[in-house]
């Protein structure tokens, strides 16, 4: 199982992020590197790519506020 985490190295401030959208459904099969979600800080929108291939399990829904390094789902 591989965690899908909010990156910790994209920006310097200790800002929380908001999951603006999931681009895949819970339980979907994804390929490593596929675009799966979009997140937003106070200033910039970022893309989240699948860290592995497998079946996605979404832990945090769209509009959830998540800190840097927070787990938003898993791929198994």
Image (cartoon, rainbow, N blue to C red):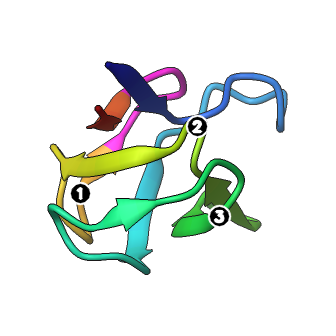
Q: Residue at x 56, y 36 (%)?
A: 52
**Image position, residue 68 (x, y; %):** 54, 27
**Front position in the image: 18 or 59:** 59
Measured in 3D between alpha carbons, the distance from the residue under mark 1 to the one under mark 3, in whole angstroms, is 21 Å
Query: Is 67 one of the magenta-colored residues?
Result: yes
**Front position in the image: 9 or 27:** 27
Q: Quadrant of residue 45?
A: bottom right
Secondary structure at numbered mark 1: loop
Binning the other alpha carbons within 10 Å of mark 3 as few (below 14), some (14 to 19) or many (20 upward) gives: some
Q: Are marks 1 and 2 in contact (CB under 8 Å)?
A: no
**Front position in the image: 40 or 13:** 40
Q: Residue at x 71, y 53 (%)?
A: 33
Q: Residue at x 63, y 25 (%)?
A: 14
The disc, 1 or 2, on the residue closer to the chain's N-terminal end is 2
Q: Is residue 62 above or below residue 51?
A: below
Q: Which mark is residue 64?
A: 1
User: Would residue 65 be found to the left or right of residue 4 on screen?
Assistant: left
**Image position, residue 71 (x, y; %):** 34, 28
Disc number lying in front (2 or 3): 3
Q: Is residue 38 visible?
A: no
Q: Which mark is residue 15?
A: 2
Query: Is 28 one of the magenta-colored residues?
Result: no
Q: Is residue 19 above or below residue 9?
A: below
Q: Is residue 69 visible?
A: yes
Q: Mark 3 highlights which residue?
A: 34
**Image position, residue 41 (x, y; %):** 61, 57
Which residues, given as a range, are shown in magenta?
A: 66-70
């Amino acid at each position: 199982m591989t965690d899908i985490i909010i990156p910790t190295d994209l920006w310097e401030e200790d800002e929380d992020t908001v999951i603006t959208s999931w681009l895949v459904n819970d339980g979907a099969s994804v390929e490593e590197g596929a675009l799966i979600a979009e997140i937003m800080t106070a200033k910039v929108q970022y893309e989240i790519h699948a860290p592995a291939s497998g079946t996605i399990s979404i832990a945090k829904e769209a509009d959830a506020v998540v800190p840097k390094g927070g787990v938003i789902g898993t791929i198994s």
